Amino acid sequence: MKSLVVITGPTASGKTRRAVDVALRIGGEIISADSRQVYRGMDLGTGKDLGEYAGVPYHLIDICPAGFKYNLYMFLRDCNAAIDDIRSRGKIPVLCGGTGLYVESVLRGTRLPEVPENKELRRSLAGKPLDELAAILSGMKTLHNTTDIDTCARAIRAIEIQRYYVEHPEADATLPSVPVRDALVIGVDIDRDTRRRRISERLRQRLDDGMVDEVRRLLDSGIPADDLIYYGLEYKYLTLYVTGQISREQMERDLEIAIHQFAKRQMTWFRGMERRGFHIDWIPWDAPDFTDRVLSLI
């Protein structure tokens, strides 16, 4: 029996439902590996789909207030604590999510020091366009999740983290990694055309379900617009729309394009994981025996 089961894949591939099915069969509990589902009140935009959990216990969802800036250091701290807690009760942790850096860092056993804010660096980068910030980051040896760098604030934070490691090489030396040796990593395989169709359909459904109103409530609660824009994707474009900076038509068009691009970057990350030595068992998203195939590998 594996000590950790991972269900990952691109957005709109149906990961949550598959993870729930597996957890129900093995008596497992789900840990979210999604960089935005940690925030309370950010439900439709992050695709929490809590109604799909069918009573399966879940972890690392709704643990921070919206507006907070959760990071990899915090995720690894909280995820490892959740894994230990689940195992202590004789259950199997099922890590589910599409944030590739989070998934890979858990499997790699990465341990990080907390990276403080570098105000001088932030001032020097303020005002630079996103493509220039991305170019700076791409020139650095980085483990930062480049799939999520779609706002200037997040790109600056990524550069800040990498600069810290350059200036404090002892930080890596004092925190050796402890790789997970007996994990089963399942990738939900979905073809490009189906993925694009599902992304578009899901976006329309979430807009119909009130995603714009969700963003309005967050803004009305006192969260600064820039803090929501920081989260990227849905919260970036819907905030720009709600605050009158772009039209409804432009919001829907640009957001749909951005989500498709995000899914493509996710797949690039997963393929990169395979090149870096991580074995992923890919199972078709619509395979009727999906869960049985997972169980045969556990």
Image: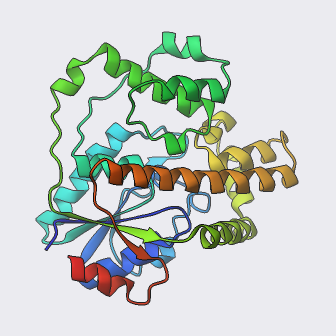
Q: Residue 104 appears at what percent x and percent y? A: 32, 49
Task: For the C terminus, give its image quadrant.
Answer: bottom left
Q: Residue at x 52, y 70 (%)?
A: 13
Picture quadrant of residue 196: bottom right
Q: Identify the colour scheme used.
A: rainbow
Q: Number of marks in the image?
A: 0
In the rendered image, residue 162, in percent from the top left (x then y), is placed at: 39, 24
One can see residue 63 in this view? no
> At 14% from the left edge and 56% from the top edge, which residue is drawn?
181
Q: Quadrant of residue 194?
A: bottom right
Position in image of residue 229 (x %, y %) = 65, 40
Q: Is residue 221 above or below residue 171?
A: below
Direction from residue 262 to residue 297 in the image, left or right: left
Q: Can residue 205 be seen in this view?
A: yes
Q: Give the quadrant of the N terminus.
A: bottom left
The percent coordinates of residue 22 (x first, y second) are 32, 79
